[in-house]
Amino acid sequence: MKTLVFEVFGEPAPKGSRTVGRRKNGTIYTRPANPKEKSWAKAVSDACRGHVGFDGPYEVELKFRFVSPGKPSYSYPSRSDLDKLVRCTLDGLVVGQVLTDDRHVTRLVAQKEYGTEGCIIKVRSLSD
């Protein structure tokens, strides 16, 4: 099985809902509700440069790290829904061509912890 491990630095951003707007000419558009979503997906796809993707099915492990606040309310990071963080990160892996399509992910492990901001990504091919 082929395995690829790399790290993305920066603040992980969730892929949330979309905001609807209307242009001056009356047409309707949508944009991401989270302004940081695009920059996180780009950071993930940029980190994929130099890594050769492979065919699915895939097993993906994501370890999201957040800076601990001065006085945390909990012993674990409570910011951002884990499933929305995963959605945005998988989209970045597809754009970066490590995954051919995120629908081919058959195993997924994701966690949040305190540490240096970023994400450690491990992609393993389950074929062969």
Image (spheres, grey):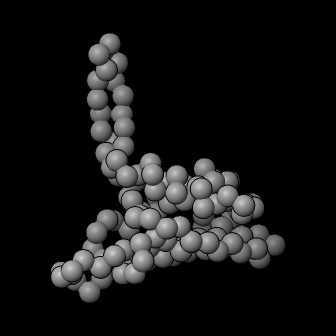
Quadrant the C terminus occupies: bottom right
Task: State whether residue 99 appears in this view.
Answer: no
At a point 53% along the width and 67% down the height, the residue shown is 8
**Horizontal and vertical percent position of residue 39:** 45, 51
**Horizontal and vertical percent position of residue 62:** 51, 73
**Residue 66 or residue 18, whichever sits in front:** 66
At a point 18% along the width and 82% down the height, the residue shown is 71
Among the 4 quarters of the image, the one containing residue 12:
bottom left
Q: Farthest residue to the bottom: give it.
A: 75
Classify residue 84 as left or right of residue 74. right
At a point 38% along the width and 68% down the height, the residue shown is 82
Classify residue 78 as left or right of residue 55. left
Quadrant the N terminus occupies: bottom right
Classify residue 55 as left or right of residue 105. right
Q: How many marks?
A: 0
Task: State whether residue 48 appears in this view.
Answer: yes
Classify residue 25 as left or right of residue 1. left
At a point 59% along the width and 56% down the height, the residue shown is 46
Would you place residue 53 above or below residue 67 in this image?
above
Q: Farthest residue to the right: give it.
A: 128
Q: Farthest residue to the top: give it.
A: 25
**Horizontal and vertical percent position of residue 15:** 40, 54
**Residue 108 or residue 36, whichever sits in front:** 36
Would you place residue 51 above or below residue 21 in this image?
below
**Residue 30 or residue 7, whichever sits in front:** 7
**Horizontal and vertical percent position of residue 96:** 63, 54
